[in-house]
Image (cartoon, grey):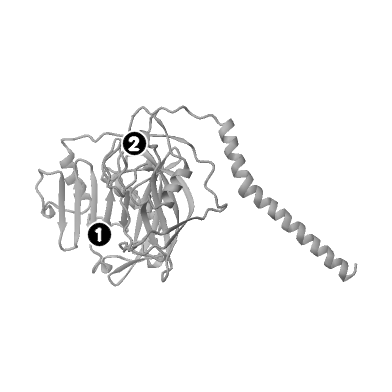
Amino acid sequence: MNLTSVAAFMKKGVKYLILVAGVYYLVIFVIFPGTLAVIRAIFIPKEPLNPVYGQLDPLEFAEKATTNDSIPEYVLNTKNGKLPATLPDRIRVYKFKPQQYSYLAGTNAISEAEILGFTEEDLITDLKGDIYRWRNSKLGSMLNIEVSSRKVMLETSESGKSTYYTPGEIHQQNAKEFAIELFKNIGRFNDELYQNGEQMVRLGSYTGNRLSETVDIREAHVALVDFYRNIDEVPILGTDPKEGLLRTIVKNPSRTPTPLNNPMVQASYWEIDPKTSAIYKIISVKDAWNAISQNRGVTTNITPKGMNPFSEYSPVYVQQILIDNIFLAYYETPKYQMYLQPIYVFEGTYTAIGSSGGQISIYFPAITGEYTRKVNLPPDQFQE
C-alpha cells in the first residue's frame, strides 16, 4: 500500500470517526433525554394529586448579600445545554411534628449546657424567658439555648486558642464519631433521617489565631462536621445548602466538659412526620428557570474560590452565573412552619472581572401559586 492510499484511508477513517462521534452525542444529549421524558409520561403511572393541606405558607429564605449594583447575567450551562427532562410534575408534602412544651425543657437545657462545658456560674439570664444564655468569659464562649424550639447556638472566639489543641489527634472518621456522640448526649440525634443521613467533614488547623482548612491529618487540630438528611431520596436543605442544620467543630474531647471540646455548635431543625398522603403539583422546571433567569430566585450560597470554610462570608460581586445543575429538594425554614415543602435548587459557578469567581446556589419555590397562601409583597417582589 503506497503513501497515497494510506492517506486516503486515514482521511476516510477520520470522517467516519467524526460521524460516529456526532451521532453518539446527538443520541446521548438530544434524542435520549427527550425520549426518556416521553416514556416516563406515557408508561410510568403518576400518583393522583392530593393537596389535603390546602394552601401552604409562603417560604422564607435568607439571601446572601452581594456588592452588585446591577443584575447578573444567567446562563444555562448544563452538559447538554438543556433543562432536565426527568423531574416530576408533583411531589409529596410532609408535616413537621408540632412543637411540644415540656415542663422539663428548662431543666434539660441546663443539663445540655453542662455537657457543653458551661456551669451555673456562666448563666447570664434568668430561667423565666424562652432563651437561656451562658458566657464563659475566660474562653470567649457564648451559648444560647431556645427552650421552645430546642435550638442550640454555641460560638467561641478563635483568638489565642491554638495552644489548647494538639495536632494529629483528629481525622475524618473519629470526627464523625465525636460529633454524633455530642448530638446524642444533648438529645439532638433522635431523628432517624439524621441517623441514616450523611456527614461532611473538613479538617482545620490553627496558624496563630487563624483557623484554616487542611487536608493533612498531621496538621489538623479540629474538624468541622455538617450533618445532612434526605427523605424519599430527596435532600432536605436549610437556608444555606452548604451548611447542615446540625453542625459542629470538634476536637478529640477531653474527659472534663469544656466549650473547647466543641467550640462551635449549631442545632436548628424540626422533626418530620415521614407518613403523608399529601401530593402537590409543582411548577415546571421551565417556569422555574424563567424566573431564575429574570433574577427572581434567592441566592442562598456564594462560596468564592479558595474560601476558608472556617471563616465568615464577605459579600462579593457577581457578574455572570453559569447554572450546571438543577434538582428538587425540600426546604426547612428557620422559623417553624407546619409543612416541609419542595424547592428548585439551581447550582453552578459565578464569574466576575477581577476575581476568580466561585460556586453559587439559588432557591426557588416549587409549589404552584394556587396552593401557596398569598401575602402582601412589595412591588419589586415576585410570588409564584
Q: Residue at x 33, y 49 (%)?
A: 239
**Mark 2: which secondary structure?**
loop
Residue 127 picture location, percent across and down:
10, 45
| Residue named by callout 1 | 260
How far apart are the alpha carbons under marks 1 and 2? 45 Å
| Residue named by callout 2 | 372
Seen in the picture, residue 298 relative to 278 is either above or below; the reply is below
**Mark 1: which secondary structure?**
helix
Residue 369 picture location, percent across and down:
37, 37
Which mark identifies residue 166?
none
Mark 1: few/some/many CA within 10 Å (<14, 14-19, 20+): many
Residue 266 picture location, percent across and down:
28, 51
Seen in the picture, residue 226 relative to 275 is either above or below; the reply is below
Quarter of the figure with residue 8: bottom right
35 with respect to 365 (left or right):
right
Find out whether the residues at labels 1 and 2 contact each other: C-beta distance under 8 Å. no
- Location of the C terminus by quadrant is top left
Q: Residue at x 20, y 40 (%)?
A: 148
- Sequence-earlier tag: 1 or 2: 1
Residue 319 picture location, percent across and down:
41, 63
